[in-house]
Amino acid sequence: MTELEILFEDEHYIAVNKPAGVMVHRSSIAKDDDPIYAMQVLRDQMGHHVYPLHRIDRPTSGVLWFARNPDVVPAFQEQFINQNIRKSYLTVVRGYTKEAKGIIDYPLRKNLKKELQEAQTEYERIGQVEIPFQSSPRHDTSRYSLVRAHPLTGRMHQIRRHLAHERNYIIGDNTHGDNRQNRFFRMHFHMHHMLLHARSTAFDHPITGAPVLVTAPLPDYFEKIVTTFGWKSLV
């Protein structure tokens, strides 16, 4: 990878469309020999240092923000702390959600040794489909939902874990998902990615006060599923 798609750029901040499989920055969790880091790619692309303002999971695609200099980092992160930044994700999950919209309020641990932390995710089911293929021995057909999710807190893997708690497993999630469904999508749709995309970010610019709305186009593999399931007009 030589360049990242720039979604927003001014003298203070830069937003990019992070591809799935790319890490935000160096981390001890990288298992492969030569991982790609968005921070390094963007640094080389812009010709100066950049400073990550938040994280999104490695298998998640979509909007990712950086600062051009360290002086403007605190102002942006204060927006996160005060919940003034509205992040919207699109995902495809197993089954129909129990409600058309709601809030999943379920505390999460960062790991087994950590205390529970409050965590809330707002969601809305914007599409549903039943296809005439058997992905489980219990049913002759398979049901899926297109969900728009807004994390109200910022816990590790929050959306993935919250939807798994509801048994609406995200398709392609190899950590918290349903392996049977993941195999089904690989076999029938040649889909080898997790269907979770950081679609948009909305907030008032921390320096100028101007309203900002940045939207990341869907990856090709996500676009293919959306089109196949008849959801193109919903995204």
Image (cartoon, grey):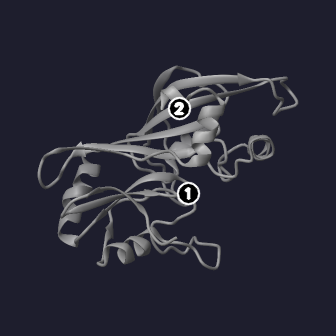
Residue name at image x 56 percent, y 24 percent: 127
Instruction: Decide: is 43 above or below 141.
Output: below
* Location of residue 40 by image quarter: bottom left
Furthest residue toward right: 137
Dot 1, crowdedness within 10 Å: few (<14), some or many (≥20)? some
* Location of residue 204 by image quarter: top left
Instruction: Decide: is 93 above or below 205.
Output: above
Q: Nearer the viewer, residue 211 or 122?
A: 211
* Disc on res. 76: none
Disc 1 on helix, strand or loop? loop
Q: Would residue 42 be found to the left or right of residue 174 on screen?
A: left
x then y, percent, for residue 179: 76, 46
Disc 1 from disc 2: Cα separation: 19 Å
* Image depth: mark 1 or mark 2 in front: 1
Q: Amino acid at mark 1?
A: Ala
Instruction: Decide: is 97 above or below 28.
Output: above
Q: Amino acid at mark 2?
A: Val
Disc 2 on helix, strand or loop? strand
Residue name at image x 61 percent, y 26 percent: 230
Res. 165 visible in picture: no
Q: Would residue 231 be found to the left or right of residue 169 on screen?
A: left
Q: Earlier in the sequence, mark 1 or mark 2?
A: 1
Tell how many labels: 2
* Location of residue 52 by image quarter: bottom left
x then y, percent, for residue 221: 62, 47
x then y, percent, for residue 226: 59, 34
Q: Would residue 197 be found to the left or right of residue 150 on screen?
A: right
Res. 101 visible in picture: yes
Residue name at image x 67 percent, y 47 percent: 172
- The residue carrying mark 2 is 147
- The residue carrying mark 1 is 20
